[in-house]
Amino acid sequence: MIAKSERTGFAAGAALLALAAFLPAIDTGYWLSLGVTIVMYTVLATSWALFSGPTRYISLATAAFFGVGMYVVGGGIGLLPYPVLILVAAVAGAILSALIGLSTLRLSGVYFVIFTLGLTELVRELVAWGQTTLGSSSGLYVLTDVTEKMIYWILLGLAAFVFLIGWWIRRSRIGFALRIIGDDEVVAAHSGIDTARAKIVLFVVSGTIASVTGAILAPRWTYVEPIIAFSPMISFQVVIMALLGGVHRLWGPLVGVIPFALVWDVISAQFPNQTTLLLGVAFLLIVYAIPNGFVGLIEQALARVRAGR
Amino acid sequence: MDIIVTGLLLGGTYALIAVGLQLQYGVARIMNLANGEVLVAGAFGAFWLYTGSALTPYLSIFVTAPLAFALNWAIYRYLMLPLVRRAKSHGQLEVDSILSTFGLSFVFVGIMVAVFGGEYFSYSYLARAVQFMGEPYGFNRMVAFAVSAALCAVLYLWLNRSRAGLSIRAVAVNPAAASLVAINVPAVSTFAFALGGAITAAGGASLSTFLTFDASVGVIFTMKALIIVIMGGVAEVRGSILAAFILGLAETAVATWIDPGLTLAAAYLLFMLILLFRPQGLFGRRT
């Protein structure tokens, strides 16, 4: 059974996807590059919200998975073909996120946030240390014939896949269980939900997707360094964009990613030294001005229109 | 032996920083992720007054600590209390306060980069070797340890002997019960939060006498303070002090034996082990 509103959603999604797929035909320079950024953050923010939206666990580990994916491609590009490496990255991301999920089960709230942030730093330090001790350079060259156009299309496919997964999870038992966990974890446990399992499954889904995204994007940077691959800025921006859009709807993060990426592109070109300050302002704005994101604002406006009628 | 003494000296300053965060998290129950930036501001204050007006770094505490007190008072009063009032549940408050203090920390880093630039800063103060048990140690590190230890001791006595200290401890144990015995919980929380900020700034001044710092290094110290507080058990000052020494020792040992680039990794590893095996802290009781 598919409800009418869902059918409209599917149609809108498919139309949007088809429209987006034509972007490389219009421009292959600046706009395509901005398009890749937007689709990348759409994938990351939407998959982040799959886990963090219902559970309200703020994960800052996105960059860790992203970087691992990137390093899988960077390290193996001479040995295996690119599509195989993306699969390897998916497996690596799944294993890493399962390990983290298993060990962070008991943590909640602020401990989880700090743990995930620390984890990214830990992985980065270890990779950087391993590279300088074992190898000679501090980075890896990723030389392929994969063009930005191909990256863009692959990412679009991944985005469609993420939305399908999100839609399916919402309808499934596990999505329902997760919403109850988000409302009250004690109640969820008492009504027979295996809260640990539900959280791990979703965390693995989200981590795997982040890792695949990193793998897909590796050829975009021809030279991969720990400071680029594991940049904590990626995690922070993903959190900001998802929350800016709103995490209680599947399409919420998308509504946040597009305006943020466009504005951010202008801002970081105009004030390259003030990005940290502005990122902080964005965080504060989200907390104090738009706690429910753009989706919350849109829904409020809709409710007002309906009430006025 | 060398490692033990250096580690303990470092741990002394860490203890002071951790106690600052503990006052904020344990009493006011706000995890202030902008804590490290206050520390860096204290370090910049010491640097600026020392190089500009030749003021002894430790005297700069009398300038920076009251400023940090006022700043943190304002943060709690005008940014955190509205969130406390708005929050429908504890989880909601936690998410909101994490995001807003993260935002604040970015804003502070941005301001400090704009004012002081992105370079590394250090200055030379009491940088001479002193013989101790047959080995040379930096005199600046020893003074930093002594000052931190003295501040910790004063704070500890004040918390345990005075009436104001008693009400702070009461709020730390149970805010709801504290308000029943006529303690103004919001006022005490605000005061503890501000005091924690002032202590952190003092820790920053002390660190700046022997460490190189830059505008964006704050987050590392936030993490270290957090690691110590969680390792020691949130409600226990003595636990934090011991945990600070453990962290100081572990970092020094890793830096000496393996690689100085891995000190942070060592700290995180310690943190993860604690979270996994004793999430209530070394001295905390299971709830």
Image (tube, coloured by chain):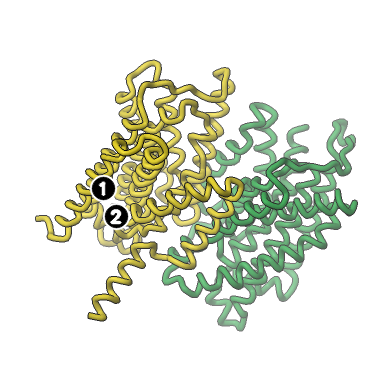
- Going by the image, does A161 lie left or right of A41? left
The picture quadrant where one finds residue A206 is top left
Q: Quadrant of residue B164?
A: bottom right
The shade of chain B is green
Dot 1 amino acid type: Phe
Residue beneath the point at 46% across and 26% down: A222
| Residue B232 visible in this rendered orientation of the protein | no
Tag shown at residue A163: 1
What residue is shown at x 25% (from left), y 42% (from top)? A161
The amino acid pointed to by label 2 is: Trp
Q: At which x and y percent is residue A27? A: 35, 37
Residue holding disc 2: A251
CB under 8 Å between discs 2 and 1? yes
Give the quadrant of the N terminus of chain A: bottom left
Residue B55 drawn at (x, y percent) = 89, 54
Q: Chain of mark 1?
A: A
Secondary structure of the residue carrying numbered label 2 = loop
